[in-house]
Image: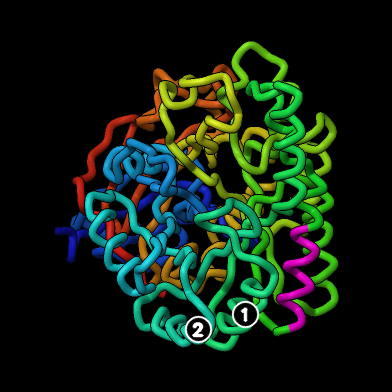
Amino acid sequence: MNAERTLLIHGGTVVTPETMLEADVLITGETIRAIGRDLTAVCADEGEVIDATGWLVLPGVIDPHAHIELDTGIYKTPDSWFVESRAAAFGGVTTVIDFATQFKGQTLPQAVEQRLRETAPSVIDYAFHVMVTDLPPGQEDELGLLEELGTRSIKLYTTYRPNYYADDATLLRLLEAAGRYGLMTLVHCENDALVTAQTEALIAADERGWRYHALARPALAEQEAAARVLFLAREVNAPVVIAHNSSARTSALVAQARDAGQAAFCETAPQYLILDDRVYEGSEPWRYILQPPLRAPGEPEALWKMVAGGAVDMLMTDHCAYTREQKLAADDFTQTPGGLPGLETLLPLTVTYGIGGGYLEWPDVARLLAANPARIYDLWPRKGALLPGSDADLVLYDPAYTGFLSAETLHSGAGYTPYEGLAVKGHVVATIRRGEVLVRDGVFLGAEGSGRFVPR
């Protein structure tokens, strides 16, 4: 335990969503005690001093959308909470919002209780969205139990029959109830009828290989579903997050709704900002099977412009650590589990392609990867903030480093990365979670099970 431990981060450049300043960060126990110039006298001989000269001191990354030990009812990721949370820590992630899936016949509290048992080995802190899949008419009051359980957001899907799909009447009913109980609703938006028709046409043409994956789920399917969900949410005054935007047009729809006064937010991920659908014509298209799929070559730049302009609120990963073996089982996009590993690479990719591409400044990184997720999902200011009294979740980042990403040096159990061989600028020197140094100089120092559930 580190209840009274004192740690001073000395000489670094502190990055907040508003500014950058040369300052020390004094940590006592699990919280930030003070931020100011040369606090060495305050620290005296009480504790450890980390010299952060030349490094950036960022708030710990919050990934607001990830799937660890995912069970869809069809596929399971064979990863573990210990391994994937450790990989996250190597990438500067100190908090993850995962999902408590309601399986058929379960109550929502039972879904949360089951997930709490599964997440016990985590080394980083965690919260949950509750994936609502079985809440018939007349049982909406069950959503009122979620605030007491510390899980103030739900997830719905406009696709994935039969286990996740919600029709329009169900969407409207649950959006209204969630709004009434003060919950945020996150929605996976793809028009199910369009996806089904496109998939059936490809199957009929004997075009089931991985290379055809993006054709089955066109950008139009995402855009139409997002527009519909935004309309329904507005009608019942429910706050909503449009999940994993893969196109600039989707983000523009959210921005337009927000500008009109709606409580509407959106997120995107590095895969949509860096990769495009030409990879499906390459030698290893299996690496890039995910939903929504990657888009046309001009889309990443257009989406970056949306991020730079403020239309996108959060960057996330949609992390799913299906293994190389699971992906390679059959050259058939209808039989390949969708999802990519990404927890460890979120921060360096954001820095390399966001700042390096001229779209972001360092304060934007703190905003998109920490402050905004914390504010939108009721974690602020405990998480996502470098403020006295906040949890001491920090990342020390060396911006001078240059290197390449490789599955051989990453720590996920997936055994591959969609970013194999990509150059990165900077790397995580140390990750500190609630005052405890989890990772330093490439060595894991934490303990299995030291992460905590964060009620919100």
- Residue 210 lies left or right of residue 217; in this view the side is left
Residue displayed at 41% across by 53% down: 394
In the rendered structure, are the residues bearing label 2 and label 1 in contact, judged by CB atoms less than 8 Å apart?
yes
Where does residue 440 sit, x and y in percent of width and height? 32, 37
* Of 345 and 12, the residue lying toward us: 345
**Res 356 visible:** no
- Dominant SS of magenta comes to helix
Quarter occupied by the C terminus: bottom left
Q: Amino acid at mark 1?
A: Arg
Where does residue 114 sit, x and y in percent of width and height? 28, 62
Where does residue 254 sit, x and y in percent of width and height? 78, 63
Magenta region includes residue 233:
yes
* Of 152 and 36, the residue lying toward us: 152
* Of 53 and 102, the residue lying toward us: 102
Callout 1: SS: helix
Q: Amino acid at mark 2?
A: Glu
Residue displayed at 40% across by 23% down: 415
The residue that disc 1 covers is 173
Instruction: In the rendered view, tell whether residue 424 sits above or below residue 367.
Output: above
Instruction: In the rendered view, tell whether residue 209 sits above or below residue 71.
Output: above
Instruction: In the rendered view, tell whether residue 52 sits above or below residue 372.
Output: above
- Residue 80 lies left or right of residue 382; in this view the side is left
Residue displayed at 81% across by 32% down: 296
The residue that disc 2 covers is 140
In the image, which residues are magenta? 225-235
Dividing the picture into quadrants, the one containing residue 358 is top right
Magenta region includes residue 90:
no
Q: Kindly report the distance in space between the C-alpha atoms of the residues bearing marks 2 and 1.
A: 8 Å
**Res 80 visible:** yes
